[in-house]
Every structure is written in C-alpha cells, then in structure tokens.
Image: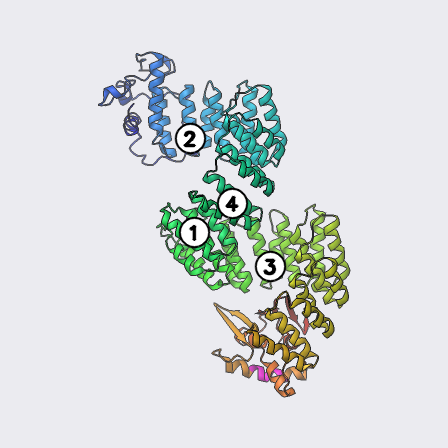
C-alpha cells in the first residue's frame, strides 16, 4: 500500500487546478457533482486508468470505474478482477484521507474520484461523505448523498452521525425516519447516534419508541450501543430504565460503569453514586473525574475534596481533565494552598498544559483572590500574533485564548479591581483578540459595581457592534448596569427593545425598580410577567420583596411571599426571609419581625438580626436593638458593622456612656470601622472623598463652595441633624463635622466641574446618613440640579427638594 504522501502526489497529478485558481473557495460555494463527466483534456486522456509510482510492487496496477464505459468518452476500462478493483479503490481512498484535514483537500479527493469515475460508487461515495462530515462540511455531504444512485446502511449512518455530532438533531431525526421509510435497516453503528440525538433533546418518549423498535426487530447489539442506551436514559433522568439496561448488558467496559455512575450523579443521588462507585470492578481516571465533578455539581464540595484525596492516596494518575476538575474544586472552596499544590503537581507531572488546563489554573487563582499569580499564568498564554485594528475586533467564538482573556477580566471584576478590568479590556481591543459575550458581560458588571455610566454606554455600543445584543445574559447585565448606575430610563429602553422575553429579562427589570425604590412599578412588571405565562424564579421574588420593603408595601410583600410558597412551590431561602424581616422592620413592626425570625427558624443567621438591628436604628428602638445585638454577638463577634450600628443607636439616644463602651470594645478587639467613602466619576477620572478629606487637589475650592452653600441652605430651612454626631462635643463642632461628610464633598466637586443643569451622580459605600439626606434635598432645590445618590441600600433621586425614597430608606 502506498503511503499517504504518494497518494496525494498521484491525486494532484490527475487533478490539476487551473493556473488562475490558487485557493479553492469554501465548500458552500463549490459542490462537486457526478451528473456530467469531466471535460476530456490531453492530460486526462493519456493512460487515464493506469496510475503508477516508482514502487510498482507496492501500488495497485489499475483502478476501474464503476460507471459504464460510455459515460466517459475517450476512456477504456482497465483490466483486473472486481475484487482487485475494489481493493485498489479502497486503498487509494484510505491513503488519501489520512492527509485530508480541511475542505480544500477533501475536494481534491472528490475531484479525483469524479475524474476516475468512482464518485457514483457506494464505497467511494460513502467514504467521501465521511470525509466531508469530519471537516464539518455537511452541506456537501448531504448534496453528495442525494446524488448517489444507491445507498446502503453505511451511507445513511455516515450522514446521520455527521448531523448528530454537529448538533443538528432535527435533521438527523428526519434522515433516520427517511431511512426506515425506504426500507434500509439500521444497525448497531447507526443507532448510537440516534440515541445521542434523543438524549441531547431529552426526548424520553421518542427514545423509548426507538428502543422498543430495536427490541422487536432483534438488532444485533454491542457494548457501544448498550452504553448509548444507558446514557440516553440517564440524560433523560430515568434512572430506573438506565439501571435495567445496565443490568441486562452481557458485556460491560469502563465506559459502561462510568455512564451509569454519571446517571446517579445526574439525578442527584449522591449516596447511590458512592455505593455504585465502590462496586465498580476497575476505577480508571475517567471514573474519578466523573465522581469528583459530579459531587461538585451536586454542591457537596466536601465529599468532592475527600474523593480527590482518596484518588491521590491510591496513586491514580492525573489526566488534563483531572487537573481542570481539581483546580475548579480548589477555586470554588477558595483553597489557595490546595490550588498551589495542584499547580506544583501539574508542573512535576510534565503533563501537556493545553488552553483549558491553563484557564482552569487562572480561574482558580482568580477565585482565591491571587490576581498576581493569575496574571503570571495569563502572561504565558500564546498570542495569536495577529495585529489588527481595534475597530476590527473579532467575535469569532470562545477559543482557549478568548476564554483566557474572559477569565482575567472576570477575575479583576469579582475581586473589586474594576480599573484593572477596564485596562485589560482595552488591551484586548488593541491586540485584536476575539471578544466573546462573556467578556462583555463581565466588563458590564464592572461598570455596574463602580457606577461608571459613561463607560457602560460605550460597552453597550460595543456589544451592539459585535452582534451580542440578542444574548439573554448580556442584555440582562446591561439592564442591571443602567439600573445600578442610576439611569432607569435607559434600562427601560433596553427592556422594551428585547428580542426574546425570558425570566432573566423580567427579573433584571424588577431588580432595577427595586433598587430605585419604585415598588409599584416592580409589582406592575411582575404582574405583566405572570400575564405572559412566564414563571418567576427565586431571584424574581427576591427583587419583588426587596421592592416592597423599600416602598413600605407591607400587605403586598406578604401577599407575594405567600404566593411564592403556595402557588409556585418555591421554598423560601435566606434572602427571601431576610427581605420579609427588613419589610416588617422598616414599617416599625419590630416585634412582628422578631417573631418572624423565630417562626421561620433563622435565628441562627446573623444577617436576620442585622436587618432587625438596622430597623431599630431607623426607629430609635434602643431596647429592641439591645436584644438583637445580644443575639448577634455570639454569631458574629467580630463584625464591625453591627457594633458600630449599636454604638450609634445609643449615641443617638444620648446614652453616650453605652455608646463609648462599644467603641472601646472595638478598640480592644482590634476591630476597625469601615470608613465612609463617596466617589464621583468625572470624565476619565474617579474622584474619591472621605469625611473631612483634605487630599483632593482642588479641596480649597470645594471647601469654599460648601462654606458659602451651607448658610444658604439654612436660610431655606435646613437644620443640621447634630444628633447624628456620635461624640459628646459642642453643637458648633458637630455642625462642622456634618458639613464636610463625604457625600457633600463629592456633590460639591460635581457641581463645580459640570455645566449648570447637568445631573450629579454620586456613589457611597455605606448607608447615607440622615443629615446628608436632608441637606441634599435642599442642595437640589438651591442649585436646580438633579442629584442621584447610590448607597448600599438603594438609589436616591433628589429633584426640586424631594427624594424618590419619600424619606423611607
């Protein structure tokens, strides 16, 4: 048998492309047919059927066409028995296909078959179809299939398998039905692809019909077919039938045991999977990978960690998939030391580090907060080397390189390093790397967290340009970004223009209205969602209950809380229960809120008592605050927020001794209060302020502006809330403290550096204080500016001396 290189030399000698054609077009633009013979040329008429090389002993002497002699003028059949002719044809196609790695090379093979008269033969046609499907050119394979005068089971199998493997399940179903209609009997090679389609579509009924047909017609089975049937039932969630087929199998291999193990894990039967795992006669690396990954998917990360330790103790080797799964486990548990140990094992094992293992390594470091190590791994990512314009940025899929960029952007965002995320995203554009929807979604999230509205609009335009506007999760992130940046109108525009309605869109819009305190609008959107028969999920109800809480809609909040449990069968989570506690507490129903905590068994959760403690501060309920702090102390003894809150409650009630006692307690325990901080985004710079800050380059101008503004506000009726200064000092000193809170400094900076009438957008890392809330209402009235302030709880829109929260926050 001649080698592949010799076969290609023969093919290129027979099939000579025209001189002006250097690069053949894609398969969709040139499909070879066998309807007409190729034009006879001088080169093709010279010994057209005898193809020889220097090594006569290693090559067939003749290749005979299957078509009649009259179909090819100028050609005469060559000699040789049919057996030799078939063997020669098979050897040539086999050798040529070894090097056929793209569409152009497959088309060369196809051209040679047409010239030699073999294309209409079943063997050659089936082989050519197989080559087309392997290089992903299904349209050419399907066209060639339609031109074949006769087709056998192998021909149908090749085409069904090709469409099934490419994810075109409906086409594969149609071909299978047509195959049965034409009386062609499928075999044990055809049916695994058919069951794969039913498994991917999770069509249990259709797969059962095929299984029944298989049993009635006594199709010869083998371990591959049986494994595909078990896998079908497993992916459709029918563990009983999967077990029956598994138990009836005459032969089982490691794949059989792993498929059944995956069935237990898929339906969430972790104890059953452990027992089955122990019964397995041979545990290979794939078994361990499936066990550890399945336990992770079921949320039992402790068990997954124990399985990983057992795998190491038994001396099982690690595959690249094992390293990826182990690194994902370390990242999920934020176990940096374990992740570094796995990294060392990866280096020592000299395993080939492909793009996916490298991305798992980066993701682990990002989730563990070690962005420096992640950056070092990222620097080893091979660059594609293409230098293109930033305006020509591509969106051609999630290759390993693209995922690497996305991973780093996501890591910076989730570790709060938003500026670094923006820098990396700009670098991604400059280097012309492919941008996927995941990267854009992450950078949109960075805009949401930092409140960068201008940058968010630019990224939104970028997403439109790249064609990602229809992506459900990206569009939802854009709605969320506009909501968190204070531009509720833009969020509504994106929501109304949505091409496909899903629960994610509705939930994002409900959350946007909730953060802006517009409870009635949130309820309206929720009712519209129900009218369109879109089933809400747990997150939808979190946003809705939060909206009711911020708007003080107690009756509506209780109504939807019961609706969630009774009509939709959703079990309340900690977030739902905390929202109800906050709802009752904000409305002043403190005793009812305490009873709700005990009735729903969440007294062991510090977040529930924090919600009650915050309500006590709002209503100046010292006794209830003391009770809530006593319950919270053993749960979170080192939480600075609750201790500061309790100290402030005592100070507000003029109980200075009690307030100072808690502050001394914080000093003795080394607990530091998180400093209040406000920031405003002007142009390409972020201006950050703390109370009494003097570090800003234009601080003299800012202080001078406030020095002139405060007396003007007092003339309009503003009175400083001196009880908010939690130090036993004179009233004048308290007023000075209040005059230069971080919110006021940031707003003054915005007013100075923006034209008249421009809205001022300020972000704060803590809850806005009572004095600043009152002062900002007067500032909006005095300056004629709209002021949008976002604190940790909600948005405040100040206009003409009023706030959107209605003084209820």
Tell me residue 143's x, y (percent).
46, 27
Tell me residue 573's x, y (percent).
67, 54
The residue at the point 51 percent across, 46 percent down is 307
Q: Residue furthest front?
A: 313
SS type, badge 4: helix
**Horizontal side, residue 203 vs residue 458: left or right:** right
Residue 311, relative to residue 339: is it above or below? Answer: above
Which portion, as a residue range, is magenta? 705-711
Residue depth check, mark 3 versus mark 1: number of the one nearer the observer: 1
Residue depth check, mark 3 versus mark 4: number of the one nearer the observer: 4
Residue under pointer 3: 490
**Label 3, label 4: how many angstroms apart (C-alpha)?**
44 Å
- The local crowd at label 1, few if under 14, some if 14 to 19, many if 20 or more residues have their Cα within 10 Å, is some
Which circle marks residue 342 in the picture? 1
The residue at the point 26 percent across, 19 percent down is 46
**Label 1, label 4: how many angstroms apart (C-alpha)?**
15 Å
Sequence-wise first label, 2 or 3: 2
Q: Is residue 590 at all visible to an observer of this figure?
A: yes
For the N terminus, the quadrant is top left
For the C terminus, the quadrant is bottom right
SS type, badge 3: helix
**Label 2, label 1: how many angstroms apart (C-alpha)?**
41 Å
Q: Tell me whether circle 4 and circle 2 mark residues in contact (CB < 8 Å).
A: no
Residue under pointer 4: 292
- The local crowd at label 4, few if under 14, some if 14 to 19, many if 20 or more residues have their Cα within 10 Å, is many
């Amino acid at each position: 048998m001649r080698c592949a290189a010799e076969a290609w030399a023969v093919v290129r000698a027979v099939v000579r492309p025209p001189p002006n054609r250097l690069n053949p077009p894609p398969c969709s633009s040139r499909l070879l047919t066998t309807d007409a013979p190729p034009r006879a040329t001088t080169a093709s008429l010279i010994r057209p059927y005898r193809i020889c090389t220097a090594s006569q002993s290693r090559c067939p002497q003749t290749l005979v066409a299957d078509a009649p002699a009259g179909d090819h003028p100028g050609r005469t059949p060559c000699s040789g028995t049919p057996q030799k002719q078939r063997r020669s044809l098979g050897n040539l196609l086999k050798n040529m296909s070894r090097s056929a790695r793209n569409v152009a090379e497959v088309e060369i093979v196809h051209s040679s078959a047409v010239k030699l008269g073999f294309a209409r033969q079943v063997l050659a046609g089936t082989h050519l179809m197989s080559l087309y499907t392997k290089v992903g050119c299904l349209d050419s394979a399907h066209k060639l299939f339609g031109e074949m005068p006769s087709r056998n089971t192998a021909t149908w199998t090749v085409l069904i398998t090709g469409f099934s493997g490419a994810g075109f399940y409906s086409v594969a179903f149609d071909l299978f039905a047509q195959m049965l209609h034409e009386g062609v009997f499928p075999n044990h090679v055809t049916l695994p692809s058919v069951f794969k389609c039913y498994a991917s579509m999770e069509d249990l009924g259709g797969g059962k019909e095929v299984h029944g047909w298989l049993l009635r017609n006594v199709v010869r089975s083998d371990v591959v077919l049986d494994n595909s049937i078990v896998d079908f039932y497993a992916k459709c969630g029918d563990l009983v039938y999967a077990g029956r087929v598994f138990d009836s199998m005459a032969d089982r291999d490691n794949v059989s045991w792993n498929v059944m193990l995956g069935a237990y894990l898929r339906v969430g039967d972790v104890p059953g999977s452990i027992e089955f795992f122990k019964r397995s006669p041979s545990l290979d690396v794939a078994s361990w990978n499936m066990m550890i990954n399945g336990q992770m998917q079921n949320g039992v990360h402790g068990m997954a960690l124990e399985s990983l330790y057992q795998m190491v103790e038994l001396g099982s080797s690690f595959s690249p998939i094992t390293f990826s799964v182990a690194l994902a486990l370390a990242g999920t548990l934020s176990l940096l030391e374990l992740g570094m140990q796995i990294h060392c094992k990866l280096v020592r094992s000299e395993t080939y580090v492909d793009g996916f293992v490298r991305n798992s390594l980066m993701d682990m470091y990002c989730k563990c907060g070690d962005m420096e190590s992640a950056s070092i791994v990222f620097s080893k990512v091979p660059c594609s080397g293409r230098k293109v314009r930033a305006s020509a940025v591509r969106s051609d899929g999630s290759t390993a390189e693209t995922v690497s960029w996305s991973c780093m952007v996501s890591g910076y965002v989730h570790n709060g390093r938003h500026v670094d995320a923006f820098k990396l995203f700009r670098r991604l554009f400059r280097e012309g790397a492919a941008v996927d929807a995941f990267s854009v979604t992450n950078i949109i999230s960075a805009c949401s967290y930092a409140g960068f509205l201008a940058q968010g609009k630019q990224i939104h335009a970028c997403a439109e340009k790249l064609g990602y506007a229809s992506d459900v999760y990206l569009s939802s992130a854009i709605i969320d970004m506009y909501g968190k940046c204070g531009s509720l109108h833009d969020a509504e525009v994106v929501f109304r223009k949505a091409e496909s309605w899903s629960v994610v869109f509705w939930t994002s819009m409900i959350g946007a209205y909730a953060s802006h305190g517009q409870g009635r609008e949130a309820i309206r959107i929720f009712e519209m969602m129900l009218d369109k028969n879109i089933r809400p999920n747990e997150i939808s109800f979190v946003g809705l209950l939060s909206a009711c809480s911020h708007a003080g809609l107690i009756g509506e909040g209780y109504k939807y809380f019961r609706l969630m449990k009774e009509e939709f069968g959703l079990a309340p989570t900690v977030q739902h229960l905390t929202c109800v506690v906050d709802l009752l507490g904000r409305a002043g129903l403190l005793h009812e809120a305490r009873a709700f905590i005990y009735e729903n068994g969440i007294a062991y959760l510090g977040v529930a008592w924090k919600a009650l403690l915050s309500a006590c501060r709002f209503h100046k309920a010292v006794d209830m605050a003391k009770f809530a702090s006593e319950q919270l102390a053993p749960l979170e003894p080192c939480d600075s927020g609750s201790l500061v809150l309790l100290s402030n409650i005592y100070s507000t009630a003029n109980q200075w001794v009690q307030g100072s006692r808690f502050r001394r307690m914080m000093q003795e325990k080394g607990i530091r209060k998180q400093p209040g901080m406000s920031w405003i985004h002007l142009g390409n710079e972020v201006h950050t302020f703390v109370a009494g800050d003097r570090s800003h380059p234009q601080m003299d101008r800012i202080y001078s502006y406030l020095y002139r503004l405060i007396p003007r506000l007092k003339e309009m009726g503003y009175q400083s809330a001196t009880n908010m200064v939690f130090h036993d000092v004179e009233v004048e000193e308290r007023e000075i403290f209040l005059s230069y809170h971080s919110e006021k400094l940031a707003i003054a900076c915005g007013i100075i550096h923006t034209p008249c009438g421009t809205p001022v957008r300020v972000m704060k890392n803590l809850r806005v204080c009572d004095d600043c809330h009152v002062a900002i209402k007067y500032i909006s009235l005095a300056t004629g500016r709209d002021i949008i302030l976002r604190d940790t709880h909600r948005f405040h829109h100040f206009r003409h001396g009023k706030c959107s929260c209605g003084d209820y926050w």
